[in-house]
Amino acid sequence: MATSESLPWKLRQARLERSIKQVELARQLGVSQAAVSQFERGNTSALSFAKIKDAARVLGLDLLREREAAVESRALMYCERADCLANVAYTRGGKTIVRPRMTLAAAGMASYCCECGELLLDHCPNEDCAQPVSEGSFCAACGTAYVPPAAAGGGENGQADGRGRDLERIRELTRPRVLD
Ligand SMILES: [Zn+2]
Ligand SMILES: [Zn+2]
């Protein structure tokens, strides 16, 4: 059975909206009615991609827009743990900065870090801002660090002591790891 919102389902909806019979569409595509019927029921291998594109054209369905709509419903997300393997810590001007690795995940759905299992965030951690996440280490709207440097050890008031600890921590975080 074709699931709602899938391409077979959308093609079928578009065909019904235009009151085009399966046999009619099949004739225009140069395939059997059985092939169209099977495709609409979710057997996507019943039609070649070229035929699917033809069908979309006949039915006025914009495949590219369908794909874009699917991509648009995804958001950048990141893990807010400074010590997570997904994130990279570095120093700039003696300050610790953590660059989070961004993941593209379905917007509005709970997603978890594939490294540490933490719930991923899709918005700025500054509650007054809460803008959607963009690439980089800092929120483009308010400048807040996505991953709080304090959590990486040391913190912003970085005394010599704290900085030393930071560097140690960064060395540890960036040490090459052997993955098996
Ligand atoms: Zn993580
Ligand atoms: Zn922000």
Image (cartoon, rainbow, N blue to C red):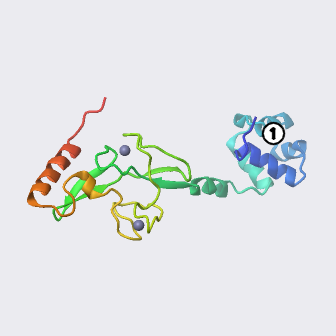
Which residue ends up furthest to the top in the rendered image? 180
Residue 85 falls in which quadrant of the image?
A: top left
Q: In this view, does 36 lie above or below 109?
A: above
Q: Which residue is drawn at 39% across and 49% down?
A: 79
Q: Which of 18 and 98 is in front in this view?
A: 98
**In this image, 162 relative to 68: left or right?**
left
Tell me where residue 66 appears, x and y as whole percent: 66, 54
Q: Which residue is drawn at 80% across and 54% down?
A: 59
Q: Name the residue under label 1.
A: 36
Secondary structure, mark 1, is helix
**In this image, 123 relative to 99: left or right?**
right
Tell me where residue 37 appears, x and y as whole percent: 82, 37
Q: How many other residues sit within 10 Å of disc 1, few (<14), some (14-19) or many (≥20)?
A: many
Q: Which of 80 and 56 is in front in this view?
A: 80
Tell me where residue 5 appears, x and y as whole percent: 71, 47
Q: Which residue is drawn at 40% across and 60% down?
A: 125
Q: Residue at x 82, y 42 (%)?
A: 30
- Quadrant holding ligand 2? bottom left
Q: How many marks?
A: 1
What is the quadrant of the N terminus in the image? top right
Tell me where residue 68 appears, x and y as whole percent: 61, 57
Please, what is the three-letter code of the amino acid marked with disc 1?
Val
Which residue ends up furthest to the bottom in the rendered image? 141
**In this image, 31 relative to 177: left or right?**
right
What is the quadrant of the C terminus in the image? top left
Q: Nearer the viewer, residue 11 or 79?
A: 79
Residue 160 falls in which quadrant of the image?
A: bottom left
